Amino acid sequence: MLVLGIETSCDETSVAVVKDGKKVLSNQVSTSLRLHKKHGGVVPEIASRMQLETISAVADLAIEKARIKLRDIDLVSVTNRPGLLGSLLVGVSFAKSVALSLKCPLLGVDHIHSHFYANFLDAKGVKLPFVALVVSGGHTSLFYVQDFDKISLLGQTHDDACGEAFDKVAKILGLGYPGGPQIEKLAKQGNPSKIKFACSGTKGELDFSFSGIKTAVLYYVKKHADCSMRFAVSNAQQAADIAASFQESVIDTLIRKSFLACKIKKTNRLVIGGGVVANSRLREKFTAAGNTAGINCYFPPISLCIDNAAMIAGFGYELFKKGFRSDLNLNALP
Ligand code: KG4
Ligand code: ZN
């Protein structure tokens, strides 16, 4: 079964063709990132305008690279939630028109759930049930996955998302956007135990809070660094130590909470997805801690961590097999 996946929840415009929920035949991703850089974050109007302009070309390329004809598509699977409203609407409207013209079924899927599904693409996959951790620019959530249509939320962030905290700390340190990769790079030169930054406690033991640690970094920089640079630290080693110490504390918190979720749910399978999982220190630390605790940690390949349509096609295939369908009233749910 050939599924056309469409993903436009944030700044990416992505279209993919996936066979039987697993084999990625093509996965085209076009990003408007360079247009947002000077604003220090994604500007929704710019993102949706670029998506409107590029989606047809991206889809044509995805079909061509998959070496199929558009009429071979059996299902159109599209991100319809959550995300930026204008961006989601571009993908949903495009998906509807393709499904209508091909007279094939349409399915709207959840972007966050699709992130952990990336672990099932071009891979053997993981036995159900498992605990899933999704760490992206917009979300930090822990789920218990009994099946692809039986997903319960165990905990989530009550303020900043994990990737958002990386982006904001990068801004405080005077680094560019997106901040995650820059913090990771800078942290490699730093000492992770130099400064004690801690993530705030939460009422729910499986919830997260990253806004406090971001503010702690801001105050630390204000107090210890040269403020004439408008909060951008002028001492390179100090900046690296801040990045490393912040990153270490965030990763330790993610490990502690997701391992606790595994303990509570009595499973030794932890499936992780989302943009932040591109972080190599996070992968190393989860793997090492998992070896000690007897928990198997699964990550998607780096290329499937960031937003992409292959995960949307794959997850849509699983739900379609279970009888899920959308109709042309499908709407975007930000
Ligand atoms: O999943 P994603 O592509 O988009 C959302 O659904 O939000 O995640 C983007 C986020 C950004 O906040 C970015 O800074 C973060 O993932 N990120 C990273 C790394 N690469 C991307 N965070 C930490 N380390 C990285 N290497
Ligand atoms: Zn995402």
Image (cartoon, helix red, strand yellow):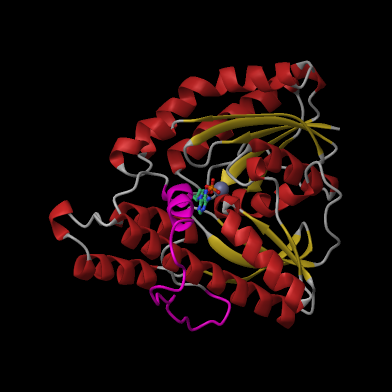
Nearer to us in this view, 251 or 20: 251
Query: Is 146 rendered above or below residue 328?
Result: below
Q: Residue at x 44, y 26 (%)?
A: 50
Query: Is 59 rendered above or below residue 91?
Result: above
Quadrant, the N terminus: top right
Percent across and percent down for residue 147 are: 80, 61
The reply to whether residue 282 is visible in this rendering is yes
Left or right placement of residue 54 versus residue 223 in this view: right
Give the main secondary structure, helix, strand or loop, of the magenta stretch. loop
The reply to whether residue 107 is visible in this rendering is no
- The quarter of the picture where residue 232 lies is bottom left
Residue sitting farthest toward the left = 228
Percent across and percent down for residue 161 are: 46, 61
Q: Residue at x 38, y 42 (%)?
A: 42
Q: Residue at x 45, y 58 (%)?
A: 187
Q: Residue at x 32, y 52 (%)?
A: 171
Task: Give the magenta range.
Answer: 179-207
Question: Is 190 part of what is drawn in magenta?
Answer: yes
Percent across and percent down for residue 301 are: 70, 45
